[in-house]
Amino acid sequence: MDEHGRCGQDAHRHQAHGHESHGHGALGPARRAELMARAERLAQDLSLQFTTLRRRTLEVVAEEGRPLGAYDIAERLSAPGKRVAAVSVYRALDFLTEHGLVHRIASRNAFVPCEHGHGAGESAVFLICRSCGSVDETISAEIERSLDHTLAQAGFKPASRIVEIEGECGACQGRQEEG
């Protein structure tokens, strides 16, 4: 896995086939700063409160190299004698998810930072490695078209368009072949 949480050649393979990939590992200082600046701009543009708890929750998610659950986040935010309640963290995560700053990985009930804005109705496809726990996000025009067709046939209007695929990343597959 590289410094961005991407598994070996997989991120490059997705890009080569018309897919845009975004690894979800710990963000470096520059990428964290970009994410925080985007959050600040969003709050200002929409006249929303970017509270200290929302800010710190986003920082904790961005600093982590793996998906984090609300209880893990609450633990990291708590200080001796000052416990942060998980329900408060869930409220902050709802805000951050609603505004496209974090993604919820439903199969893990955990959250990862979103480093880019998604267009309205754009699907996110998460590739989740069962071995190392890495999460890679990809966007695919082919999947978009297929999903649009399926939804139209069913007469279904989705609230969100997130696909999660579990398996094994290229790096973990390579380690198994070596061993």
Image (cartoon, rainbow, N blue to C red):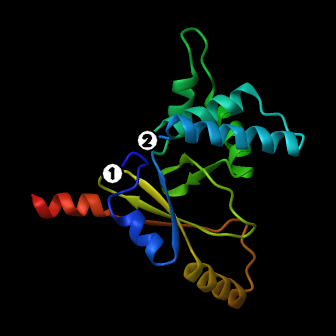
Residue 32 lies, in percent from the top left, at 58, 38
Q: Quadrant of the C terminus?
A: bottom left
Between residue 35 and residue 159, name the one nearer to us.
35
Name the front one of labels 2 and 1.
Answer: 1
Q: How crowded is mark 2: few (under 14 residues within 10 Å), some or many (20 or more)?
A: some
Q: Which mark is residue 65?
A: 2
Residue on which the image places disc 1: 1
- Residue furthest to the right in view is 47
Residue 80 lies, in percent from the top left, at 54, 10
Mark sitting earlier along the chain (2/1): 1
- Residue furthest to the left in view is 179
Residue at point 16% right, 60% down? Answer: 176
- Find residue 13 and report its image quarter: bottom left
In the image, taking residue 170 as reference, residue 43 lies left or right, namely: right
Between residue 79 and residue 29, name the one nearer to us.
29
Residue 98 lies, in percent from the top left, at 74, 51
Q: How crowded is mark 1: few (under 14 residues within 10 Å), some or many (20 or more)?
A: some
- Residue furthest to the top in view is 81
Type of amino acid under label 2: Gly
Type of amino acid under label 1: Met
Tell me: residue 35, above or below residue 146: above
Tell me: residue 132, above or below residue 18: above
Residue at point 29% right, 54% down? Answer: 131
Total numbered badges shown on the rendered structure: 2
Tell me: residue 171, above or below residue 63: below
Between residue 90 and residue 34, name the one nearer to us.
34
Helix, strand or loop at label 1? It is loop
Residue at point 68% right, 61% down? Answer: 118
In the image, taking residue 99 as reference, residue 169 lies left or right, namely: left
Is residue 63 at all visible to an observer of this figure? Answer: yes
